[in-house]
Image (cartoon, rainbow, N blue to C red):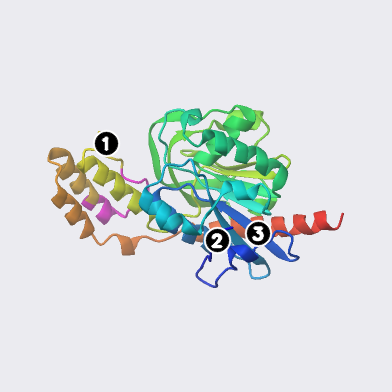
Amino acid sequence: MATAMLTTRDRTLAPLAEARRDEPGTITIGLVNNMGDAAIRATERQFGGLLQADDLDVRVRYFHLPQVPRSETARATFLTSYASVHELWDDPVDGLIVTGAEPRAPRLQDEPYWPMLTKLIDWAEGNTISTIWSCLAAHAAVLHLDGVARRPLASKLFGLFDCAKACDHPMLAGAVTHWPVPHSRLNDLDKAELAARGYVVLSSSPIAGADTFCKQRGSLFIFFQGHLEYDAQTLLREYIRDITRFINGERDTYPNMPHAYFNETFGADFERVRARAVAAPSADILAHIAEIPVAKSLINTWRASATNIYKNWLHYLADEKRRRAAR
């Protein structure tokens, strides 16, 4: 089995080889990281910063789906500390987080990793206390489990969206009435259809729709269409990535500016960038973007809400693990 060390802002979590599910007083989390090569390390840091509770011993293990397309560089460097999901079958975890991936096919069933992802969904129901499904993974899970199909959006839902608490639920204990959430997706799930299939919507937005929802199956499945784990600059990095693809001729349309993300000054700066890039795409535009001092102006206004929700999840795992052990 591979070994790994996840360093967070406050402490270093135990090596993967020591992260045994049957250790008393220990919560073991599996992170199945399907994000693109450039985002692998950032995703580790982002989730690692949330998987903390002062009164719990939290261990994290890393896994990857071998069928997710990767560069040789990523396989030789980023993924050396990761184990294949096959190792989960005989050595399960208490809680599981499955991230999304950048879509490559119009239909989820045509993604190269679809058969393995659906096997993971079925496995998680009977072998975890709770699993979090993020973004595309959430879309895949509800499609596989209940036939709820995602709907293409007219344009990418991208930016910060105000989401409101939709019900009282243990995952939202201590939550404020509403909070901003980063969203970055091309598809959506119908809130009414989710409710009709037995899903409980925990938070929602007039613009972004169902934000967080859950369903109690053999495991408590929690679904995030948004990205509470994002850091303050993640949307900026995605935006610049898409601008770069447009300038390099890798996409036909110029990307929309992230909603409610930049202040007025930097919004105007990026409008001027758009006008230049649409009129005459050139590499020097990217150099100009690098000179815009926007990064330091960005504030993670969703951090407190993200920390609260993930802490609630960790305590649910700990309480449920103790309850099952006492049976």
Q: Secondary structure at mark 1?
A: loop
- Identified at 57% across, 30% down, the residue is 143
> Residue at label 1?
251
- Identified at 73% across, 66% down, the residue is 25
Residue 202 percent across, percent down from the top left? 62, 44
- The three-letter code of the residue at mark 1 reads Arg
Residue 48 percent across, percent down from the top left? 53, 62
Residue 200 visible in the picture:
no
Query: How busy is the neighbourhood of tag 3: few (under 14 within 10 Å), some, or many (20 plus)?
Result: many
> Depth-wise, is mark 3 or mark 2 nearer the camera?
3
Residue range corresponding to the magenta coloring = 257-269
- The three-letter code of the residue at mark 3 reads Thr
Q: Magenta segment: does it hold 263?
A: yes
> Depth-wise, is mark 3 or mark 1 nearer the camera?
3
Question: Is residue 325 or residue 316 the one in the foreground?
Answer: 325
Q: Quadrant of the C terminus?
A: bottom right
- Identified at 18% across, 56% down, the residue is 287
> Residue at label 3?
28
Q: Earlier in the sequence, mark 2 or mark 1?
A: 2
Label disc, if present, on residue 50 of the rendered structure: 2
